[in-house]
Amino acid sequence: MKRFSISALFCTLTLATLALAGCKKDEVVAAPPTVSLEFEQTVGADLLVLDTKTYTTLAGDQFRISIFRQYISNIVFTKTDGSTYAVPDSYYLLDAAKPDSRHLTLTGVPAGDYKGITFTIGVDSVHNVSGVQKGALDPNNNMFWTWNSGYIFTKLEGYSAQSTTSALTFHIGGFKAPNNTIRTVSPAFPSGMTLLVRADHSPEIHLNVDLLKLFSGPSTIRFATLSDVQSPGSNAVKVANNYAAGMYSVEHIHAN
């Protein structure tokens, strides 16, 4: 009788252990919240088409674009209560020739109600002097001036009949005063819209990136007099001030 009881007890404990193990195996771990950013690149009212499509600036100059790349970094979300969340290590290179580069998925954004987004156009000064880096900041992306120890924040190359050389070369960078071209922007959400981040929601922000804003705004750029910028300086600052004044806008937000 005693031997039977011990065996029964052992079997009971074994079955209980297996049952608990089975329960743990079936547990579903909730995925962390994500927020997606979709960047649609346009030139005025037209979608950006590389190489073949001719556009016209607000001042009347015609041009085509063969290369467009731009860094955005240091993304920060602001909640409706005023608190903020900075996305860690957020450095991205938007490349018109690589559609996947224009869709970002940010994991780990805390659940909450958000009223705004802020980010840098360019790369902060610390990362300009941090030596060889990887990923979006890899010098092999051809967005780094080895002779100048700094990143090209925005690169546009193309063609214009109004340019004295027919070529357009705008390599905008520089992080030292008085030629600092790092710009921080906070494109407003559509009126009444709030970004709701939840474990069971994956909201998506659609942003428009209007390249026409490089050449208009605080300074009007005419290609007959300015078509080649390849170093930090006052001309680079003019272009940076232009695109900081409205190049990015939030078109709409999908709650998903």
Image: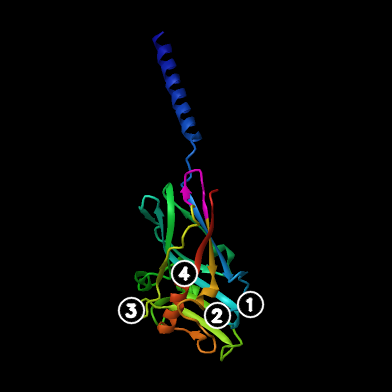
Please state the horizontal and vertical placement of residue 22, each as a whole percent of the image.
49, 30
For label 1, the crowd category at 10 Å Cα-Cα, with few meaning under 14, some 14 to 19 and many 20 or more, is some
Q: CA distance from mark 3 to mark 1?
A: 35 Å
**SS for dot 4:** strand
Type of residue at label 4? Tyr
Query: What is the quadrant of residue 117 in the picture?
Result: bottom left
Give the magenta part as a residue range: 193-204
Task: Kindly report the distance in space between the C-alpha atoms of the residues bearing marks 2 and 1.
Answer: 10 Å
Any mark on residue 51, and which?
A: 1
Which of disc 2 and disc 4 is earlier in sequence?
A: 4
Name the spot of residue 51 as percent of width and height, x first. Answer: 63, 77
- Is disc 4 in contact with disc 2, using a CB cutoff of under 8 Å? no
Q: Nearer the viewer, residue 185 or 218?
A: 218
Q: Are marks 2 and 1 in contact (CB under 8 Å)?
A: no
The amino acid type found where label 2 is placed reads: Glu
Residue type indicated by callout 1? Asp
Residue position marked by numbered label 2 in the rendering: 157
* Residue position for label 3: 177
Q: Is residue 100 left or right of residue 218?
A: right
- Read off the residue under disc 4: 71
- Element carrying mark 1: loop
